[in-house]
Image (cartoon, rainbow, N blue to C red):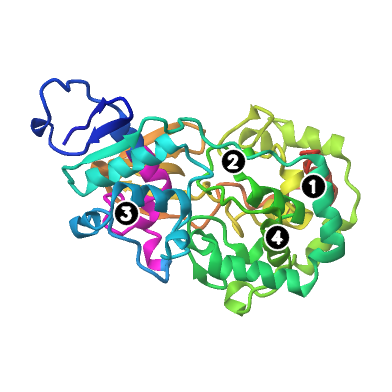
Amino acid sequence: MLLIIFSSNSETFVWAGDISKVSSILKDPIKIIDRGKGLFLKFCAHCHGRHGDGDGFNAEFLDKDPTELSNPKFQAKRSNEKLFRVISEGGAKIKKSHLMPGFGHTLSEEEIWSLVTFIRYLGKDGSLVTVPRDVKSERPMKPVLTKTDMGSFLKWFSEEGQKKNQANSGKILIMNKKSCLGCHQLNGEGGRIGPNLNRSAFNYNPEWIYAWISNPQAFRPDTRMPNLGLTPKEARAIAAFLVSFQPENEGDGGKFDIPEGWRKYLSIKGDPKIGGELFNDPDGTANCVKCHLIKGEGGTIGPELGIVGTSRTRRFLLESILDPSAVITSGYKTIMIMTKNGKFITGIKKNEDELGFYIVDKNGTKLYIPMDKIKKFKTQKTSTMPGNFRDLLEVQEVADLLAYLGTLTLPTITASIY
């Protein structure tokens, strides 16, 4: 199967079938199939499966089975325009599952048409995909929140945000209207792609929750979380709910808090200057800079920490230092691979495709492990970050590190009142 494109005065046609059926004057193959495939593997395959068979790893956690996009019967009943619309607007807008998010606020029209073409390719559909000539190639750019926007949110949060009616409105949006549970877990329900939302109140500052869900690409352009096109009112309600939420079941962790014995670390005033020296000393006890990146300097094994003082609570930062395996940041889970020749390889899984895994080992070396070389693999529950800092560091040193991490902020957003 190859793909050919040609143009008329008003539209572009993309052939998703056998090249032998196309006129010989159409000789230039295009890269749209690879572009659509890359987008599909990043945004769609975890639910719909890498081949569109509805068997992605996340499928088992959803109330509704993902569509088998490769099924010829499904494809025969859907026009290209309808496929474009559901990808762009999401399932709820066409009276289907709200768990299917819309990507119209994240991807360009050109990218969405490449997904439509790739879906036709998966179904071995030999029809032409007609693409309007005036499709936009630039991704939509939602305005970045300003200091005034954040000041308005913080004022609202102090006056209204902790009221029950606001939390209830956010709950309805998350549970029944938006696609949050397609990717996130809440009270044992929902997907396993993004972070577990049970811990939102413990992990994140309220202003960060609001800013992130309003425009995730403003902070991480390559994130898999789509921009949901939330109104300020919707984003505020969702933030209010997540900040107030506590899990119902003991098995989900109950009310999150730090152990009583850890409170001494928070009661001592830390020195951010000393903490910065401890963080950045390559020969020091902590040597955090080996794995963590700040403003372009440091390692890439662990999460980037450039604005961690804005996004994370002090309680969560303390937990991350003293018990790093309690929560492993999404995208930094370790995978152990056993090759067919008996070799064990451990690293952080950065990506995967049909042919293998892309990982980064403990030394920061990027590796690609082909699937045909792998006997078995397993995701680990232990963080690559050392778990013995309680023994290695003095209480004052931990307090100094916390003080330093607290200075790593994004001034436009940072003004926590919670």
> CB atoms at circles 1 and 2 under 8 Å apart?
no
Magenta stretch encompasses residue 46: yes
Q: Which residues are magenta?
A: 37-60
Q: Find residue 305 and report its horizontal and vertical position in percent.
A: 68, 40
Instruction: Judge whether 132 appears above or below 45 on screen.
Output: above
- Of the image marks 1 and 4, the number of the one nearer the N terminus: 1
Instruction: Nearest to the eye among marks 2 and 3: give it.
Output: 2
Amino acid type of the residue tagged 3 in the rendering: Gly
Secondary structure, mark 2, is: helix
Amino acid bearing label 2:
Gln
CA distance for labels 1 and 4 = 13 Å
Give the farthest residue toward the right: 269
- Return the disc, 2 or 3, that comes first in the chain's sequence: 3
**CA neighbours of label 2 inside 10 A, class few (<14), some (14 to 19), many (20+):** some
Q: Determine whether label 1 and label 3 are within 8 Å by CB.
A: no
Q: Quadrant of the N terminus?
A: top left
Distance, label 4 to label 2, CA atoms, is 18 Å
Quarter location, residue 309: top right
